[in-house]
Image (cartoon, rainbow, N blue to C red):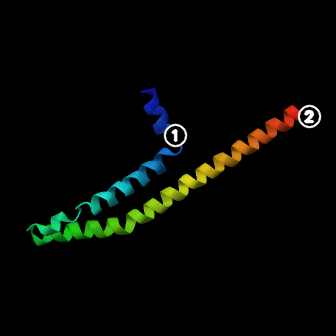
Amino acid sequence: METLKRVVRNEYFPAAAVLTLVVLFWVAGLFGGLSLLSRSQPPIATLTWLLFVYAAAVLTPLAGILAAADLLRRWWRNRRAGKAGSAKAGARTGS
């Protein structure tokens, strides 16, 4: 349980979760996500499905790009902070 709490509290978790869901959405779409259109459905159901897919096709790449950018930004920031911290520690021990 502690491991799960640590993962959920991790600063990378929200962006990683969004990126994972975007990838899963597109993988599901590649493997038959449009199968609803091959069945006989009422027109309103087909229209609703098409509007959902259209919105998802427009919004999920945007969400994926933002999530990937957030992950990279956090990673770079933590990497720079780690290097700055080790440089300061090295300067203190060297003097």
Position in image of residue 1 (x %, y %): 41, 27
The amino acid type of the residue labelled 2 equals: Ser
* Residue at 60% across, 54% down: 73
Seen as rendered, the residue at the extreme right is 95
Foreground residue, 20 or 44?
20
* Residue at 28% across, 67% down: 53
Q: Residues within 10 Å of mark 2 (few under 14, many from 20)?
A: few
Q: Which mark's residue is nearer the viewer, 1 or 2? A: 2
Disc with the residue nearer the chain's start (1 vs 2): 1
Position in image of residue 48 (x %, y %): 20, 67
- Relative to 47, say whether 69 is above or below: above
The amino acid type of the residue labelled 1 equals: Asn
Position in image of residue 78 (x %, y %): 64, 46
Number of marks in picture? 2
Seen as rendered, the residue at the extreme front is 31
Position in image of residue 95 (x %, y %): 91, 34
Disc number for residue 24: none
Q: Which residue is mark 2?
A: 95
Q: Is residue 93 left or right of residue 42?
A: right
Q: Is residue 84 left or right of residue 27?
A: right
Q: Is residue 81 left or right of residue 9?
A: right
* Residue at 32% across, 58% down: 27
Answer yes or no: do the residues labelled 1 and 2 have beta carbons within 8 Å? no
Label 1, label 2: how far apart the Cα atoms are: 35 Å
Q: Which residue is mark 1?
A: 10
- Relative to 29, say whether 20 is above or below: above
Helix, strand or loop under label 2: loop
Q: Residues within 10 Å of mark 1 (few under 14, many from 20)?
A: few
Helix, strand or loop under label 1: loop
Q: Is residue 51 left or right of residue 93?
A: left
